[in-house]
Image (spheres, grey):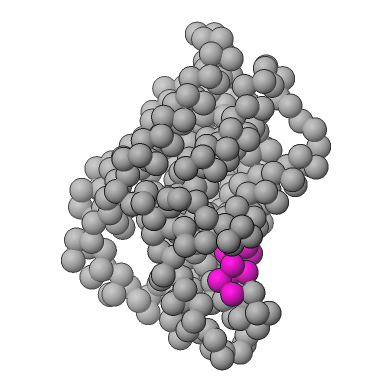
Amino acid sequence: MWPYWLMYLVPAIPSLLTGRRPLRLGWMPWIALGALFAVLIGFRHQVGGDWDTYLLHYSREIGSSLLDPVSSGDPGYVFLNRLAVRMGWDIYGVNLMSGLIFTSGLIVFCRAQSRPWLAFAVAVPYLIIVVAMGYTRQSVALGFIFWALTFLERGRFIPYVLFIVAATLFHKTAIIMIPLGIFLYSKGWLLRIVAVALIGYGLWDAFVAPEQEKLWDTYVEQQMQSEGARIRVMMNLVPAVFLLFNWKQWKRFYPNALLWFWMALGAIVSVFLVGFASTAVDRIALYLTPLQVVVFARLPFLLRRKLRQPTVVLGLILGYAMVLHVWLNYAAHAVFWLPYRNILFE
């Protein structure tokens, strides 16, 4: 399991050494970091609980043309598989392209934070190791959502919507993020509401409506359960509580703070719904995990009058090291991630 610890230490060490002034060395270190993690994600071999399922997705597209109609599934992911088949890249090509989309979105999002290295370190134990190496389709959707949230926080509504549409092409559940575009501190509320309603309806009608009965039956009627869902939902609850307790400072220093307020409320509501349909809530709560990255990257500044910032950073690094340790050693499905294998070394 040592490769996973090395993945965590790569951003964790710089986050401890940067002090109060973030270490910003331009884009080159981040491009190298993104390339490293994209290779680790993309060329993994038999790593992840759904490895065989994704092999089946790939085999279904053998013999298909790039422009053939998509009768079921998520069209963006189907296209990636068809492209990989056409180029002879096998499943590793699909995973590499998916890893590039995810890591690029995450890096852009982290670089927008006051402590980018800390933000990336927070993302490693769950978002990178578990999600990007296990839930490929949702990881791509999440990569686009990171891009979208970066634009939304800057008050740019149209790029936000476009990236959410791209995310929905890879996993239809990403449609739940569309309404968040309403919550901006700027004029044009009515126009945004109308735009969100029309786009949301279009996406729902195109991707969700044809399978809504199947989805409801699978996730709710059959009470499909996800082990560890409550723990993952609680991981979002912690930053949500920190944000709400520091709300006055948050809205004072950060633009368009209202979008994070609503994400925090969503994290709190998830705690009460997870017992009703744990898998459904678990999948949707995944899109609230950027809350962990953004809140904990800003926490040293928010608590600066109560605790020394290096102390808060150290506490967060140790806390997420504990998360990684517990998951690797005690999670029911960690066996599918161990040992880490990479096709480049097979």
- The image shows residue 336 at horizontal and vertical percentages of 39, 55
Q: Main secondary structure of the magenta part?
A: helix
Is residue 259 visible to the viewer in this orientation of the structure?
Answer: no
Q: Quadrant of residue 32?
A: top right
| Residue at image location 44% in from the left, 77% down from the top | 56
- The image shows residue 117 at horizontal and vertical percentages of 64, 32
Tell me, yes or no, whether the highlighted magenta stretch contains residue 324: no
Q: Quadrant of residue 323?
A: top left
| Residue at image location 66% in from the left, 27% down from the top | 14
Is residue 224 visible to the viewer in this orientation of the structure?
Answer: yes
Is residue 237 positioned above or below 306 on the image? below
Task: Choose between 278 and 86: the one closer to the eye.
Answer: 86
Task: Choose between 265 and 196: the one closer to the eye.
Answer: 265
Is residue 166 positioned above or below 239 on the image? below
Q: Is residue 50 left or right of residue 102?
A: left
| Residue at image location 67% in from the left, 17% down from the top | 19
Task: Choose between 86 and 170: the one closer to the eye.
Answer: 86
Is residue 26 positioned above or below 288 on the image? above
Tell me, yes or no, whether the highlighted magenta stretch contains residue 92: yes
| Residue at image location 81% in from the left, 37% down from the top | 26
Is residue 74 positioned above or below 266 on the image? below
Q: Is residue 309 left or right of residue 319?
A: right
- The image shows residue 12 at horizontal and vertical percentages of 59, 30
- The image shows residue 298 at horizontal and vertical percentages of 57, 26
Q: What is the quadrant of the C terminus in the image?
A: bottom right
Magenta-colored span: 90-97
Q: How many marks?
A: 0
